[in-house]
Image (cartoon, grey):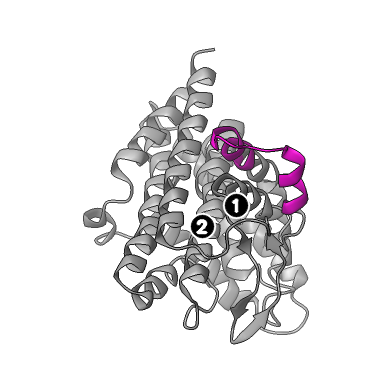
């Protein structure tokens, strides 16, 4: 199974998400989003919703498990390699983050536009440093969500494990918010996503820490990670902040309201721009290469 993952990682790194294919047929992640959206429209219809959210989460997990078992039963490793390569997001992540650096070099407005494609916060009033921070934070978090975690769960549970993780992560990104509509309905999906990302988030931080060239004490990353509102996202973000020598997080606007989040690595540089975003892209590839080395060792032991 490690060998299939190794091949899938290489395919993703080389080909990414070819637009000529996914402009014609829906990407599996899009299909997962449609399934989650259907449950949201059909079952989240008002009143106490936590129980219906638990049933939704259970149905999503069962469906993903069943599909994974069916695909894994096909002869040969082709289905496993193909699905894994499609659902990994290393090349796509780097391309999207690098687009922010390119946009910032053109103009602040273009930087805001490109970063708005990868973050959910308000971007209209961002200055250059805020745009760069948002891109770097997205890079760190999505390295965990889009690369480390899928690989981890594939190694643990094969295609069923991979598909369960992806559907849970998709559900969390769509309904796992503490809003009046989704706080109850999305509770189960959000909590299961927290559980499934607990180990991958810390593994991602470890990979960044190991390849950073100036790791510093691990306890400092651990302390910074606990400042984050998420039990998991703070780990790769804290590691990336220290690897690049920049300050991340801090105040930002959501839905027109400023929220005063604490700084991660507050002694790091705050006036950053396109160069810091490019450095984050380089760090993404270094961490990916370290992960690839781990998979190579697993494949040949």
Q: In the rendered image, which residue does mark 1 sit on?
A: 241
* Residue 75 placement, left or right of 20: right
| Mark linked to residue 136 | 2
In front here: 97 or 155? 97
Which residue, as the protein is rendered here, is positioned at the far top? 301
Task: Please state the horizontal and vertical placement of residue 39, each as a whole percent of the image.
Answer: 58, 70
In front here: 283 or 1? 283
Q: Is residue 1 visible?
A: no
* Residue 69 placement, left or right of 24: right
Q: Is residue 25 magenta?
A: no
Q: Secondary structure at mark 1?
A: helix
Task: Tell whether label 2 touches label 1 (CB within 8 Å).
Answer: yes
* Residue 138 placement, left or right of 261: left
Q: Which residues are magenta?
A: 204-225
- Count residues near mark 1 (Cα–Cα under 10 Å), then give few for <14, some for 14-19, many for 20+: many
In front here: 142 or 97? 97
Q: Is residue 238 visible?
A: yes
Q: Main secondary structure of the magenta part?
A: helix
């Amino acid at each position: 199974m490690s060998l299939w993952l190794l091949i899938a990682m290489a395919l993703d790194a080389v080909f990414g998400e070819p637009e000529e294919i996914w402009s014609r047929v829906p990407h599996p992640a899009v299909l997962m989003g449609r399934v989650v959206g259907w449950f949201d429209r059909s079952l989240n219809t008002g009143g106490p919703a936590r129980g219906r959210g638990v049933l939704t989460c259970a149905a999503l997990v069962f469906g993903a498990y069943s599909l994974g078992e069916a695909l894994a039963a096909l002869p040969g490793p082709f289905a496993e390699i193909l699905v894994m390569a499609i659902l990994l997001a290393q090349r796509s992540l780097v391309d999207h983050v690098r687009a922010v650096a390119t946009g910032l070099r053109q103009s602040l407005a273009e930087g805001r536009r490109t970063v708005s494609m990868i973050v959910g916060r308000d971007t209209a009033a961002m200055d250059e440093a805020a745009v760069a921070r948002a891109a770097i934070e997205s890079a760190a978090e999505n390295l965990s969500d889009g690369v480390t975690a899928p690989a981890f769960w594939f190694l643990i549970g094969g295609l069923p494990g991979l598909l369960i993780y992806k559907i849970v992560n998709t559900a969390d990104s769509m309904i796992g918010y503490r809003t009046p509509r989704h706080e109850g309905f999305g509770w189960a999906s959000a909590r299961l996503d927290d559980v499934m990302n607990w180990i991958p988030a810390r593994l991602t931080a470890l990979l960044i820490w190991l390849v950073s060239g100036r790791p510093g004490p691990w306890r400092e990353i651990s302390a910074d990670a606990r400042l984050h509102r998420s039990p998991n996202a703070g780990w790769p973000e804290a590691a990336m902040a220290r690897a690049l020598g920049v300050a991340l997080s801090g105040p930002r606007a959501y839905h027109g309201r400023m929220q005063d989040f604490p700084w991660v690595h507050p002694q790091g540089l705050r006036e950053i721009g396109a160069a810091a975003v490019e450095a984050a892209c380089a760090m993404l590839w270094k961490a990916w290469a370290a992960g690839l080395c781990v998979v190579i060792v697993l494949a040949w032991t």
